[in-house]
Image (spheres, rainbow, N blue to C red):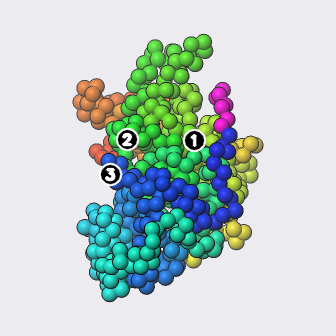
């Protein structure tokens, strides 16, 4: 049984009666001289510096003729300037359109045009591959790195950028102080963000998220997690995705935290180096990152017969588990309240290991359409393989005759739910029914205590000719834990289940395996796995893939690309 060490989260009293914009304004004023945003190995902005950047961008918007409710697109890697531009956008009253930097140029062009964005902030690497001629509605394009205008289609915009310091001086002839910060309170039902999904279906939809949904999310996170002003957060999740945008950035800013941006791919090596220095208080990430670090850095130290024996001895195991837990904690900086995992299913065997050592992890479940939270519980409350209980201001229901034992589609409604898909009423009506229930497309069960257990995507469920329902994610989770398997996909082809496997060639090389020996080892995995599975869900054959499966920004495999693999 898991040890419960409940930590009361009353060390930060969020002003729940305030709007999102007022919370941002209040945090900037209260934390004026504290560090706010840091590019790792680069520049640091204090809250007063962020306020000045916001004010200068407001001046540019005003002179360029940008009006409240206009759309402003932002596309680039996580950085201090990215977040400053986002804050300037929503505090001006405009609608932010964050775009994943991993999107292809044609998709970026389409999103900018579809959203009717009037300005685009673009990272320098992104800008190199874009063509302004394909985005005719833009007034201008500003490069994120130095906030310099690279395309101006307006004399007003050109004037504003060339005379920015002069105009700032006119507006604030004396020193710019905390009392000069004042932003207009928003209407809770107005859209704050249009976030284009990167889902596994191959196309993007613009999710309109109102201020009420963002405020509701951060209120829940404040009450559950409990950051204090000055605490550090490492922003690893892409800010173009709602999980990272809300759970890391907006939550952190409203709490007065210090946000760090790695500005590059968070590999295990970079995480170990940066986390040891930053010692973050809260970590939000996708399962893949945690799984890789635990498999590469922690499990090898106990993955032997003696180690497994020690972990199961009742008398001395607690002491040994504490040692292993401390080592695992240190890999992530050793100073965090909890690691929040979301965006994709979590490997059950890795989760089981973390629970054995009492490691403070939890699962957050949601979707872009809920900005993003639907379920989330603290690490010392969550049940094994559950994604927690329904969050504040939301209700959930399972469409099943027996929701406790028979999976059904999970639906939800409440304050977090989107306004709809931008300029796509048909898709909105398909997602939200006449009673306001958002259909998640996920199959789940809910126990008597309200814990929700996700079984897989409705569209991923494989139905055999004999009427058997197979959830491929459950088989993949087991296969992914077997020797020499990096990741896998289970598909149904001519009534036979086939496992597509991307092998761990690095591990195979370390153990001196030839290609033939690797293939034999994977085939042995298939045989062993089938012993654990009922007859209707056994794997008929394995096909090895030479490279990693293509993924979305939240590291979900784009399954639609692999459904028609020939036998």
Q: What element carries label 1?
A: strand
The residue sitting at the top extreme is: 315
Q: Residue at x 74, y 48 (%)?
A: 402
Q: Residue at x 53, y 75 (%)?
A: 93
Q: Give the range drawn in magenta.
A: 1-7
Q: Which residue is drawn at 44% across and 58% down?
A: 239
Q: Residue at x 35, y 77 (%)?
A: 166
Q: Name the residue under label 1.
A: 362
- Relative to 314, is 515 above or below? below
Residue 291 visible from this viewpoint? no
Q: Which of marks 3 and 2 is nearer the N terminus?
A: 3
Membership of 8 in magenta stretch? no
Q: How far apart are marks 3 and 1 (CA)?
A: 31 Å
> In this orientation, which residue lies closer to the viewer: 521 or 426?
426
- Relative to 359, is 411 above or below? below
Q: How crowded is mark 3: few (under 14 residues within 10 Å), some or many (20 or more)?
A: few
Q: What element carries label 2?
A: helix
Please give the label number shown on residue 544.
none
Q: Mark 2 points at which residue?
A: 274
Q: Name the residue under label 3.
A: 42
Q: Between tags 3 and 2, which lies in front?
A: 3
Contact (Cβ within 8 Å) of mark 2 with mark 1: no
Residue 296 visible from this viewpoint? yes
């Amino acid at each position: 049984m898991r040890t419960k060490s409940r930590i009361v989260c009353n060390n930060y009293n969020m002003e729940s009666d305030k709007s999102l914009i007022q919370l941002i304004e209040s945090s900037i004023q209260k934390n004026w001289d504290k560090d706010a945003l840091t590019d790792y190995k680069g520049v640091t902005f204090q809250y007063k510096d962020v306020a000045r950047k916001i004010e200068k961008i407001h001046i540019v918007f005003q002179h360029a003729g940008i009006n409240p409710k206009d759309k402003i697109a932002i596309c680039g890697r996580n950085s201090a300037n990215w977040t400053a531009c986002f804050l300037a956008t929503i505090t001006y009253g405009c609608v932010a359109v964050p775009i994943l930097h991993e999107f292809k140029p044609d998709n970026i062009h389409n999103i900018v045009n579809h959203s009717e964005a009037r300005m685009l902030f673009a990272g320098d690497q992104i800008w190199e591959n874009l063509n302004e001629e394909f985005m005719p509605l833009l007034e201008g394009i500003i490069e994120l790195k130095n906030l310099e205008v690279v395309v101006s289609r307006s004399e007003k915009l050109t004037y504003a950028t060339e005379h920015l310091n002069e105009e700032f001086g006119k507006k604030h002839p004396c020193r710019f102080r905390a009392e000069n910060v004042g932003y207009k309170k928003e209407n809770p039902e107005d859209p704050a963000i249009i976030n284009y999904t990167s889902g596994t279906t191959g196309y993007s939809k613009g999710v309109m998220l109102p201020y009420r949904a963002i405020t509701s999310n951060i209120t829940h996170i404040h009450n559950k997690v409990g950051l204090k002003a000055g605490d550090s957060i490492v922003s690893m999740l892409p800010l173009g995705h709602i999980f990272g945008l809300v759970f890391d950035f907006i939550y952190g800013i409203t709490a007065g935290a210090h946000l760090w941006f790695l500005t590059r791919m968070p590999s295990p090596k970079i995480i170990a180096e940066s986390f040891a220095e930053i010692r973050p208080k809260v970590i939000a990430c996708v399962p893949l990152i945690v799984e890789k670090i635990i498999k590469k850095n922690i499990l090898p130290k106990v993955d032997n017969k003696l180690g497994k024996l020690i972990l199961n001895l009742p008398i001395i195991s607690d002491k040994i588990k504490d040692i292993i837990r401390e080592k695992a904690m240190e890999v992530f900086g050793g100073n965090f309240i909890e690691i929040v995992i979301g965006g994709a299913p979590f490997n059950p065997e890795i989760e089981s290991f973390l629970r054995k050592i009492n490691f403070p992890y939890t699962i957050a479940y949601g979707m872009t359409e809920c900005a993003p939270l639907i379920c989330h519980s603290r690490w010392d409350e969550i049940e094994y393989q559950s994604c927690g209980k329904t969050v504040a201001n939301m209700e959930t229901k399972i469409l099943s005759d027996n929701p406790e034992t028979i999976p059904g589609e999970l639906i939800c409604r409440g304050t977090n739910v989107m306004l709809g898909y931008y300029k796509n009423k048909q898709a909105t009506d398909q997602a939200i029914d006449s009673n306001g229930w958002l259909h998640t497309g996920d199959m789940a069960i809910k126990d008597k205590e309200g814990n929700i257990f996700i079984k897989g995507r409705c569209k991923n469920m494989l139905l055999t000719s004999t009427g058997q329902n197979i959830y491929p994610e459950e088989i993949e989770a087991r296969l992914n834990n077997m020797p020499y398997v990096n990741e896998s996909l289970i598909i149904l082809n001519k009534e036979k289940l086939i496992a597509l496997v991307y092998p761990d060639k690095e591990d195979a090389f370390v153990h001196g395996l030839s290609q033939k020996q690797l293939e034999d080892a994977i085939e042995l995995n298939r045989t062993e796995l089938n012993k654990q599975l009922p007859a209707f869900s056994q794997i008929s054959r394995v096909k090895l893939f030479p490279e990693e499966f293509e993924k979305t920004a939240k590291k979900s495999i784009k399954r639609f690309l692999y459904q028609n693999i020939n036998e």
